């Protein structure tokens, strides 16, 4: 199967599909963190046309996520939020038969015709002792089923909300936006 992982520099989802024998490619404006000849560095819309069976897109959430609500008035005024919504919608409308768009809780549910996500997933449903509620907007795909539910009872917030407590660094944004391996493996197992 030909799989396009859009807006992914980490290679986590691409490699999960490749490990199952799929022709998986990633595409991002950034170079891949994992050296490979299966990464196109450039605009997703320069690469999206092709014989793809499945696409999983990770559009930037900077101007969409509720975690940045304090900056929404500025982002609305200068057009960044509307541009991010249009980018999201354009990906959703692509001609690929099976599509997943992922994003944290944000404005797509209320400000886009696409509406609410098909489902929300959590890392603790896929083998990680962490929370990070992430929406999946699915077209032509069944919702992901949990693969390895972890009990977070009694664990400190610094563990279950590790990404929230990351100290400031130049790579903090990358660490916070990388797909959890358990979720990537579930995508590859269930959609591949």
Image (cartoon, helix red, strand yellow):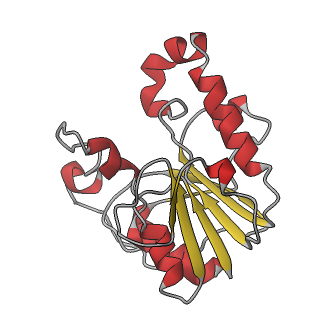
Q: Residue furthest bottom?
A: 21
**16 sits left or right of 161 in the view:** right
Figure check: 146 above or below 62: below
Q: Position of residue 125 (x, y in %)?
A: 45, 69
Residue at image location 43% in from the left, 18% down from the top:
70
* Residue 116 pos. (x, y %): 70, 44
Q: Nearer the viewer, residue 72 or 130?
A: 72
- Count of numbered labels shown in the rendering: 0
Please tell me which residue is depicted at 59% across the width and 15% down the height of the picture: 76
Residue 1 in picture, x, y percent from top left: 68, 82
Percent x, y of residue 104: 51, 45
**Res. 142 visible in picture:** no
Residue at (48, 51) in percent of width and height? 133
Q: Is residue 36 visible?
A: yes
Identify whether 54 is placed above or below 139.
Answer: below
- Quarter that holds the C terminus: bottom right
**Viewer-nearest residue: 46 or 154:** 46
Answer left or right for 25 relative to 160: right
Indicate whether 180 appears above or below 172. below
Residue drawn at point x = 33 percent, y = 42 percent: 173
Q: Is residue 169 left or right of residue 85?
A: left
């Amino acid at each position: 199967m030909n799989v396009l992982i859009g807006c992914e520099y980490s290679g986590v989802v691409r490699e999960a599909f490749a490990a199952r024998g799929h022709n998986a490619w990633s595409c991002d404006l950034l170079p891949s963190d994992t050296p490979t000849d299966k990464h196109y560095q450039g605009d997703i819309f320069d690469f999206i046309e092709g014989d793809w069976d499945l696409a999983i897109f990770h559009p930037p959430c900077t101007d969409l996520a509720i975690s940045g609500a304090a900056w929404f008035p500025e982002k609305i005024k200068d057009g960044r939020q509307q541009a991010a919504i249009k980018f999201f919608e354009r990906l959703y409308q692509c001609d690929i038969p099976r599509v997943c768009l992922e994003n944290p809780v944000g404005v797509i549910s209320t400000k886009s015709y696409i509406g609410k996500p098909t489902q929300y997933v959590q890392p603790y449903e896929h083998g990680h002792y962490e929370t990070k509620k992430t929406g999946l907007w699915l077209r032509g795909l069944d919702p992901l089923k949990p693969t390895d539910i972890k009990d977070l009872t009694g664990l400190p917030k610094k563990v279950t909300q590790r990404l929230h407590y990351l100290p400031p660094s130049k790579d903090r944004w990358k660490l916070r936006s990388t797909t959890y391996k358990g979720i990537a493996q579930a995508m590859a197992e269930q959609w591949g």
